[in-house]
Amino acid sequence: MWVNMGPQHPMTHGLWNLRVRIEGEIIKDVDPEMGFLHRGIEKISEDRHYNEIITLMDRTCYVAGLSWEHLFIIAAEEALHIVPPERAEYIRVLSAELQRIGSHLMWYAAFVQDLGLTTPFLYGMRDRDLILDLFQTYTGGRLTYEYMRVGGVRNDLPLGFTARCRQVVDWLMDRFVEYDRLCLSSTIFRERCDGLGLLSAEDAIAYGVTGPMLRSAGSRRDLRKDRPYSVYGQLQFDVATANTADVTGRYLVRMEEMRQAVKIIRQCLDWLDDNPGPVMASQLPRWLGAPYAPVGNEAYLLKRNYPTGLGFSMVEEPHGEAGAYIVNDGGEHPYRVKFRSPVLINIWAAKRYLPGYRVADIPPIMGSVDVCVGECDR
Amino acid sequence: MKRDELAASLTARFGDRILGVDAFPGLLGRVRFDSTIALELFRAFRDDLKFVHLTMVGATDWVDHREVFYVLWSDADLVYVLLSTNLPPDAPTIASAVPIWPSANAHEREAWDLVGVRFEGHPDLRRIFMPEGYAYHPLLRSFKIHEPEDLEVKVRSD
């Protein structure tokens, strides 16, 4: 019998439909249905200036907007042959790592609530607000930031930001201990998560699963280490892994990733304190728009005279490996933009890791995937 | 591995059906191949060159052809490589990569849904984002965003 879990179901954390074929309580087959949130972001991008696409990136993944901006910016700068100043790169990495903590806290809150624990949900949401407050001080936004630009970032960090940011991450490091105490010592949590949703590293690779799900199976694959982009090559951190390949393993990986993100953030803050400088490249084509100058009609009408190029970037986004492929045919809009969504593939691989479990196991297993439907459907 | 080594080994094996190995920023290179050798080439990349990860499958609609591209990752060499082939726009068909990389399943459904490339031998080539029965492939250049369209949705019964 086929059963629909979704599109409106507490397990889905968004708008998608998990069709499940069951025999009794046992799952025999699954068929994830996506597309309920498809907004055609790749198509709209073909009609927009490069800097206008950044707005769409915040909407692509609404819990990791800055990570997606970072992804797009790297590919766009490659396609347009622009090199950003180093200070902008550090601010981007700082933003991406703060965003990683924010996204993982959101995941923690939602996932633990799926298991029936309410206190950790409130803790997670409260502590995520501290990250959003930080974003608000320098981007002006709490959910959609529109902060990064082709060639740099929109504005520098405000006075006193680094001190405040240090306070917040120090506080968070204490909170992580509390989270672990709440969950790992809870019988409810352990009995529902241990040994559930097993996915070996070989299967994960064959099915294209990336991110914390792959690292929880013992793989050390992390693009920040394997193919350092931006300034990750100059920062010290460890790859978080677990070897249980189950739901608890994914929890442990994400918790450790947040601690490593704090480590990266502290190094970025130290660097930013010592190295003032510009945050925007000085030589930008006129049609791209200066950081504050409004793009008027005359800029649209200007005949561009700019080289063509191809851009490709992959970043380790909180949910997994996200990719962007941009074809610049010399126009002011990209000819083609293609994004790789890690969530789409991680959900689709449910065909491999769900069969054999019981219907009641679906919420914890799918919760451990960290679903963000916005980036899955685009 | 270097790009010229890759080009030499591929040309030795596939001859003139490898149309070129170009430079590509941030990647090992872009391999342009004839779509008739798709499956053998994929198998060579996975088994002999150890590109075990299939990262991306996508397609681009050009004026006179449709380009399909595959991005692969090698754990041994820590590099990406991009494979690209051109298909005729009136019958864009290529062999499915699902027998080589199971993860191609979702990627190819997306390429079929949005750009209208057919993948021969795909076990389940349904639309993934747009509803079944939708008449268009939205990422074709001929599809204009602002034109009204009649949306016809079929309800599946099974």
Image: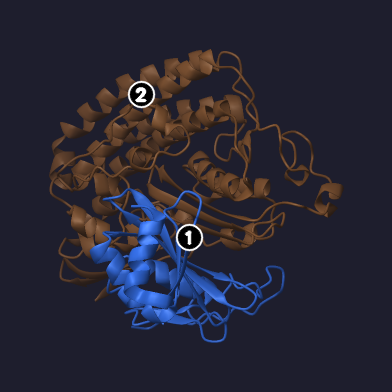
Chain colours: A brown, B blue
Q: Chain of mark 1?
A: A
Question: In the shown orientation, is residue A204 left or right of residue A301?
Answer: left
- Towards the viewer: A280 or A34: A280
Q: Residues within 10 Å of mark 1 (few under 14, many from 20)?
A: many
Q: Chain of mark 2?
A: A
Q: Are marks 1 and 2 on the same chain?
A: yes
Residue A338 position within the rendered picture, expressed as x and y whole percent measured from the top left: 52, 59
Query: In which quadrant of the rendered view does residue B143 lie?
Result: bottom right
Residue A101 position within the rendered picture, expressed as x and y whole percent measured from the top left: 39, 33
- The kind of residue on which mark 2 rests is Lys
Residue A273 position within the rendered picture, expressed as x and y whole percent measured from the top left: 52, 14
Real-space Cα separation, disc 1 to disc 2, in angstroms? 32 Å
Q: Is residue B96 visible?
A: no
Label 2 sits on residue? A263
Residue at image position (21%, 59%) is A203
Question: In the shown orientation, is residue B36 left or right of residue A192?
Answer: right
Q: Residues within 10 Å of mark 2 (few under 14, many from 20)?
A: some
- The kind of residue on which mark 1 rests is Asp
Q: Are marks 1 and 2 in contact (CB under 8 Å)?
A: no
Image disc number at residue A20: none
Q: Is residue A73 visible?
A: yes
Residue B136 position within the rendered picture, expressed as x and y whole percent measured from the top left: 58, 78
Q: Dot 1: what SS?
A: helix
Query: In which quadrant of the rendered view does residue B158 lie?
Result: bottom left
* Residue lying at the far bottom of the rendered structure: B90
- Towards the viewer: B42 or B20: B20
Is B95 drawn above or below residue A350 in the view shown?
below
Image disc number at residue A377: 1
